[in-house]
Amino acid sequence: MGFVHLHLHTEYSLLDGECRINEIPDAVINAGQNAVAITDHGVMYGAVDFYKACVAKGVRPIIGCEVYVAPRSMEQKDRLLDSDYSHLVLLAKNATGYKNLMAIVSKAFTVGFYQKPRTDIEMLTKHSEGLVALSGCISGSIPKAILANDLSLARERIIIFDRIFGRNNFYLELQRHGIDGQEEVNRALIKFSRELDIPLVATNDAHYITREHAQIQKLLSAIATGNTLDNSSFGMEGSEHYIKSVSEMEVLFRDVPQAIENTVKIAEMCNFEFDFDTMHLPAFKTPSPYTAQSYLKKLCDEGIDRLERENRLCDDISKYRERIDYELSVIHNMGFDDYLLIVWDFVNYARQNGIPVGSGRGSAVGSLCTYSLGITQVDPIQFGLLFERFLNPERVSMPDIDIDFSDERRGEVIEYVASKYGRAHVAQIITFGKLACRQAVRDTGRALGMSYASVDEIAKMIPRYLDVTLESALKENPELKQRYDNDPAAKKLIDFASKLEGRPRNASTHASGVVITDEPLTNYLPLAVNDSTVVTQFPMNTVADLGLLKMDFLGLRFLSIIQSTEKQIRKTIPDFSAESLPLDDEATYNMLSEGNAIGIFQLESEGMRHLLSKLKPRNLEDVISVISLYRPGPALSIDTFLKNRLNPEKIEYDDERLKDILSTTCGVLLYQEQVSATRCTKREEILGKVPRIE
């Protein structure tokens, strides 16, 4: 017969769903199934990750959501009349259904949010096409009416939902977890099914992978609600909300086999697939008679002329013209003319309005186009930077330009972009706070009812470095391991906390991410609201995977400080500009060599200041080397770099052709440009003799 789970909550039902997305496909396969749905509470945060994980394992993913339905209009928010929202499961059959699901979920946040993101009957009616609806758990509006002994209201609601979604697109949902009231609801639903010819469907409202994980789910709920595990009055009853096997579900619903059969029928109806191959870039409106291509060329040519007049070119202008023409051809052939114009436009707006803009960072500084347009302030020819790091014609991927703005005025730039392209086309991007190692310990300790002092003592034994885990902490700290082995309370705390590590804990707004789309955002992704800010429900990388234009608008405090300092200095030196400061000031390098870099962007950490005092930079190239060395991979070569810097005459190159390439970094392979420069007849032989920096 077969069975498919159509009601399942992942870890993105924050602090409620226990099912980790990467574990779901294997669990489904082991349960004898080949399809599964995601129906997180009110959100679609994990939809794309879920889809990818399922496809990778040959499991059919069904994209859905368990929405909250307001008792009246979603816009009505009276404390007494509008707090009793109800659950309803929606599943996307196709692209139209997915688009309607996004519209419903987005509006629930942006308009209907009251305690929860809520939709209403009007919205469901307007966006019902392409959707399958299930009547929901015991918290659905129909079960509520049944339990209130108002069968006429239950009948009325069934007829309304059947009319909204259409015959054979609305199902009465049966569940059996041994919960009080469930069988009363099931009996009434089965009767209504016969009477009104509305099909039944069986679900298990899965919140955890296996029965044994029920306590972990309750632990999550305890953290979310401020309860302790020994409080039996909260959370889900029993331990039946897991991914049950086909045989378990068939036995459980043997009196209504059609409810099991219909799960397969619904799964076969749902065939939505994400498109990861199409890019959806907004068009830049160019002045007549220019196309995006011709206007971009005009601006770049004018930029080169300006840079020549300002004596900011390090070589013959013909080299710049040749490089510009090459870059423009690649940009056009890859379809990114509008992209560059969009970035140029908002950076130009910022500069014209006195909003401090950073000089550039990341791969974008390798482009002469971005330099000529004023997007960056770094000459890639002078510093030998590769354009291919920014755009590689052999690898089609969205370019990435990170722009720093004054933290005090970043919002003005975002507001400009929103007003230019339309508020329905621009949003900030969501990010998720994860339960990191130490946080997991503290949250678990509270849920277990342990004293703050004992939990704090254990938490402080965990080493402080990026990506530390409880497993690695136990290996590295003998004191923690001894406590774990000899103290049952500590062992219980750490064992429970280790089950929570890495799970999303809360949603917030990404510090810099902004997305701009050609069509309204809800044609591509669902929206949410964080602290009155409209954000995407998908994080940064997922936004890019969907072919959408995402950019980093980073608010940088140091730019605000520099601007404020300039204003103070201009009171006595009217024409002062930080950009006019020399790059060879000896006093500055003496200061840095002493490790006096507190308050200097990217140089102020304790480790960086220690490295500065050891390396003792004498020029800008040295400062660049310091920043590049102080990263997880290159850091392995710090000692070699420092030793060679003291005795450059003792550096031995396995091939003399490496000398010109590696001399500026003391014989250490540090930059991607250096790797590229080693492409010669004996490239592999040479690289095999050089320490690689991953």
Image (tube, rainbow, N blue to C red):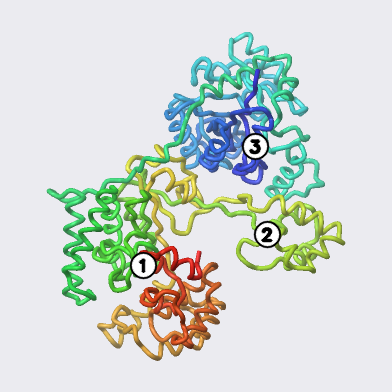
**Label 1 is placed on what type of residue?**
Ala
Q: Earlier in the sequence, mark 1 or mark 2?
A: 2
Residue 188 in the image: state x and y as whole percent.
69, 16
The answer to the question of whether label 2 and label 3 lie on touching residues, with beta carbons closer than 8 A, is no
Residue name at image x 55 percent, y 32 percent: 61
Seen at 37% across and 62% down, the residue is 363
- Element class at badge 1: helix
Q: Which of pointers 3 and 1 lies earlier in the amino acid sequence?
A: 3
Q: 437 or 74, which lies in front?
A: 437
Q: Please, is residue 373 above or below residue 492 in the view?
A: below
The numbered dot on residue 469 is: 2
- Residue at position x 37%, y 50% in the image: 395
Label 3 or label 1, whichever lies nearer to me, is 1
Instruction: Note whether 68 is above or below 339 in the view shown.
Output: above
Q: Position of residue 200 (x, y in %)?
A: 63, 17
* Residue on which disc 3 sits: 26
